[in-house]
Image (cartoon, rainbow, N blue to C red):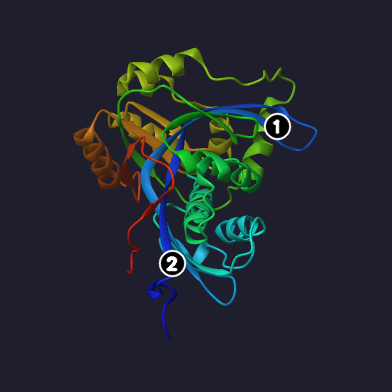
């Protein structure tokens, strides 16, 4: 039987993970969502997606946490392909995902899969939409998908899906600690945020001048000092281990530490490449972290690459 990866009618695309440098959360809206203001940065941990013409729609998953990813129509990459297919008369595809981003970790691995799928399908089906034409479809799929189409550093508003590029300088070395996600879900984190906010005035969120200034400055020390996430207290309340990781990382010299999105992954900013290596070694050697991932940001968004990964 011929693998879908071996057919001529296939396109492979890659999309990055993200970290929220700043996440401001507003009060609960009537539609059940919270107004968000976030500053995204795309980081060099990648999802790779190959779409190949097939007789029927399907998904297979390889790599990190592959067993945790659904392969039915709830899979966000498959939803992306099928939603795009509604715009044109095209053949079904089989989607092969190779994962490097932790599942359910607040780094938007599923959204990266969707962004890569949109770019790959656009190329495979020769639709010629480009990123600007794919933006409305990405916004239908989820709050993080539009940003991961474009990458770089950007402000997200609305539910996070309205993306505006940010003037930013420099590159940054990150260490990510994917703490176990047992007992922690995005709805639970937002519910805990609402509980902690009860009786308090929750202002309309907006990007902070301090964050914008730090990004223009381009110095890791400046950025580390202004990392913030309104969901962090709720995440730590639900999973105290997150707080332990943050405390340990700061004691080992991290310039800043933040819960990525709704967690549970912790993002740690280092002074440079050597600092990131030292921080990663200290965390694992001390037992504070069982697993770490090093990456640089910002990086480009979803894009077609020459060939798929076969292992």
Q: Residue at x 51, y 58 (%)?
A: 121
Tell me where residue 267 appears, x and y as whole percent.
Answer: 40, 37
Few, some or many C-alpha atoms within 10 Å of disc 1 (few <14, some 14-19, many ≥20)? few
Relative to 207, 294 lies left or right: left
Res 254 → quadrant: top left
| Any part of residue 191 in sight | yes
Res 65 → quadrant: bottom left
* Mark toward the start of the polypeptide (2 vs 1): 2
Relative to 46, 162 lies left or right: right
**Furthest residue toward right:** 30
Say which of marks 2 and 1 sits in front.
Answer: 2
Q: Are marks 2 and 1 in contact (CB under 8 Å)?
A: no
Out of 251 and 187, give the one closest to the viewer: 187
**Furthest residue toward bottom:** 1
Q: Quadrant of the C terminus?
A: bottom left
Residue carrying label 1: 195
Residue carrying label 2: 10
Q: Residue at x 58, y 69 (%)?
A: 92
| Any part of residue 263 in sight | no
Q: Secondary structure at mark 1?
A: helix
Q: Secondary structure at mark 2?
A: strand
Tell me where residue 145 appears, x and y as whole percent.
Answer: 55, 44
Tell me where residue 191 appears, x and y as whole percent.
Answer: 69, 38
Few, some or many C-alpha atoms within 10 Å of disc 2 (few <14, some 14-19, many ≥20)? many
Res 153 → quadrant: top left
Does residue 61 lie above or below 184 as drawn?
A: below
């Amino acid at each position: 039987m011929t693998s879908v990866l071996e057919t001529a009618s296939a396109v492979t695309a890659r999309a990055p993970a993200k970290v929220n440098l700043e996440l401001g959360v507003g009060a609960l809206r009537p539609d059940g969502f919270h107004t968000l203001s976030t500053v995204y940065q795309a980081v060099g941990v990648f999802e790779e997606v190959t779409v190949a013409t097939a007789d029927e729609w399907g998904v297979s998953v390889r790599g990190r946490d592959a067993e945790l990813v659904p392969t039915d129509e709830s899979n966000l990459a498959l939803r992306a392909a099928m939603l795009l297919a509604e715009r044109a008369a095209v053949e079904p595809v089989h989607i092969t995902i190779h994962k490097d981003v932790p599942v359910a970790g607040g780094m938007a691995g599923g959204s990266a899969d969707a962004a890569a799928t949109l770019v790959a399908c656009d190329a495979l089906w020769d639709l010629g939409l480009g990123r600007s034409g794919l933006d409305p479809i990405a916004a239908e799929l989820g709050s993080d998908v539009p940003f991961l189409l474009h990458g770089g550093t950007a402000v997200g508003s609305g539910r996070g899906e309205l993306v505006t590029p940010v003037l930013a300088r420099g590159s940054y070395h990150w260490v990510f600690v994917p703490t176990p996600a047992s007992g922690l879900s995005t709805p639970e984190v937002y519910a805990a945020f609402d509980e902690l906010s009860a009786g308090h005035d929750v202002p309309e969120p907006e990007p902070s001048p301090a964050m914008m200034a730090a990004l223009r400055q381009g110095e890791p020390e400046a950025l580390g000092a202004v990392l913030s996430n309104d969901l962090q207290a709720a995440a730590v309340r639900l999973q105290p281990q997150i707080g332990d990781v943050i405390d340990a990382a700061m004691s080992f010299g991290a310039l800043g530490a933040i819960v990525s999105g709704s967690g549970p992954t912790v993002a740690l900013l280092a002074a440079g490449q050597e600092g990131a290596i030292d921080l990663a070694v200290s965390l694992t050697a001390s037992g504070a972290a069982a697993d770490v991932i090093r990456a640089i940001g910002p990086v480009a968004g979803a894009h077609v690459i020459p060939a798929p990964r076969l292992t």
